[in-house]
Image (cartoon, rainbow, N blue to C red):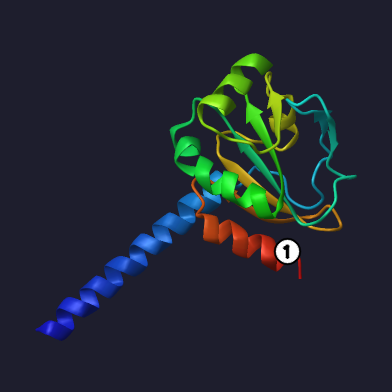
Amino acid sequence: MLKKKYSRWIIEIILILIVITAVKLWVQRDVVTGVAPNITASLLSGKTFDLYQSKPRPILVYFWATWCPVCKLQKSNIENISKDHALISIAMQSGHNEEVKEYMREENLSFKVINDEYGELSKKYNIRGVPVAFIVNRENKIEFVEVGYSTELGLRLRLWWAGL
């Protein structure tokens, strides 16, 4: 009796994992792969950022929005990672620069931000929803793509792996 119960649980867990994986693959189907499109833009700080000139590698390229509830859940993960790893974030369709700066102040966030007010950069990466994290290696190749919530540990492990 107990063996049947555990067998059923295992089958249900496997089916749930299959569904989650299928949904994840479907959501990621259109995002850019291969060489990362270059990002050359002004940061909110006024400095110029160029993805291809940015060192060190790997770098986390993180698309997010101030209006995104999942991004709000993940903001502390991104803030913590930005202390130890190269990271550029792109605030997608989140208002004018001053609005994004105010959000950063209110949330006590300090990571680098490019304001993609009209979604031009997100179009280059085929972003349809946020958050999306790209891990870009030394050769400017996208190693990993993560759509939706990502744990801090998961992102750190991917950054470590891409740096090998």
The residue sitting at 72% across, 38% down in the picture is 125
Q: Which residue lies furthest to the right in this view?
A: 53
Q: Residue 107, how many percent across, how many down?
A: 51, 30
Q: In terms of secondary structure, where does tag 1 sit?
A: helix
Q: Which of 25 and 125 is in front in this view?
A: 125
Q: Residue 92, how many percent across, how many down?
A: 63, 27
| Residue type of the residue flagged with mark 1 | Ala
Q: Horizontally, is 25 left or right of 138 in the view?
A: left
Quadrant for the N terminus in the image: bottom left
Q: Nearer the viewer, residue 97 or 119?
A: 97
Residue 96 seen in render: no
Q: Horizontally, is 61 left or right of 78 in the view?
A: right
The residue sitting at 76% across, 26% down in the picture is 45
Question: Residue 132 occupies which quadrant of the picture?
Answer: top right
The residue sitting at 55% across, 60% down in the picture is 154
Q: Residue furthest left?
A: 1
How packed mark 1 is, by other alpha carbons closer than 10 Å (few <14, some 14-19, many 20 or more), is some
Q: Horizontally, is 5 left or right of 25 in the view?
A: left
Q: Residue 101, how many percent across, how many down?
A: 63, 22
Question: Residue 109 occupies which quadrant of the picture?
Answer: top right
Question: Residue 122 occupies which quadrant of the picture?
Answer: top right
**Residue 126 drawn above or below residue 139:** above
Q: Residue 123, how many percent across, how many down?
A: 71, 30
Quadrant for the C terminus in the image: bottom right
Q: Which of 80 and 141 is in front in this view?
A: 80
| Residue located beneath label 1 in the image | 162
**Residue 15 drawn above or below residue 111:** below
